[in-house]
Image (spheres, grey):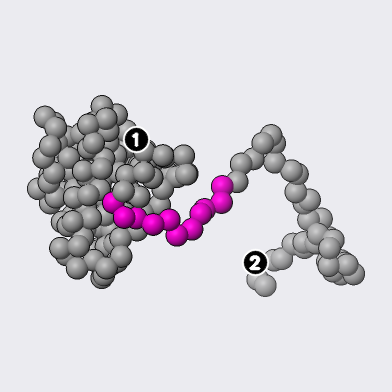
Amino acid sequence: MDLRPLVEVDLREALAPINRGNGGLGRFVPAMRTAAQLRERAAAEVLDLKLSRACYIGGLVGSCLVERLDEQAHIDAIGIEPLAQQRGAGRALVEAVCQAAAAAGVKRLSVFVSDFDSTLLSSLAALGFVRRRGVARYILSGAPAPLTQPADLGNAPAPESATEPYARAVPLAE
């Protein structure tokens, strides 16, 4: 297993496992990334390509993006090929990021993980990560409730009650 910083890797190649896995880490909406976006984020000194890692077993099987701000860093995305997960590539990748972060003087490394990702949760716990807080998820079952639409009253005075919806047309001059 060969672990390399993303500085040494073609970014398009490194993004393949992340984009195939939709970014992992409990993303609510799949986030497709491009090499140009990563270069922009690295130029803005948000994405740290020296802390971010790629994992090779024969070919590239996984990558991890790390954002850094001073002494704090955040694992933004992890993508591992399913067969490589069985060989411990995910844990090795996160462990390499932790070691690189410690060597770079990072005092706090954080990550957002879905409660349903038991494999990653157990790996993070084994590496010393501690759960700090939970994130609430909301699910809409069925059609959304209809919202009351405000009545267009033209030049009529505002309603007496604050609970009544009210709107009036306003000329552009106002």
The quarter of the picture where the C terminus appears is bottom right
Q: Is residue 158 above or below residue 55?
A: below
Q: Which mark is residue 172?
A: 2
**CA distance for labels 2 and 1:** 48 Å
Secondary element type, mark 2 = loop
Above or below, 57 relative to 73: above
User: Label 1 sits on what residue type?
Assistant: Gly
Q: State which region is magenta.
A: 127-137
Res 12 visible: no
With 162 as the anchor, is 144 left or right in this view?
left
Which residue is at a point 30% across and 65% down the rendered structure image? 108
Residue that sits furthest to the right in the current view: 160
Give residue 22's position: percent from left, percent from top: 37, 38
In the rendered image, the quadrant that contains the N terminus is top left
Judged by depth in the image, the label closer to the viewer, 2 or 1, is: 1
Pick whichever, 153 or 104, lies toward us.
104
Whether residue 92 can be seen here: yes
Give percent across and percent down for residue 114: 45, 45
Residue appearing at x 28%, y 51% in the figure:
127
User: Which residue was labeled with disc 1?
Assistant: 21
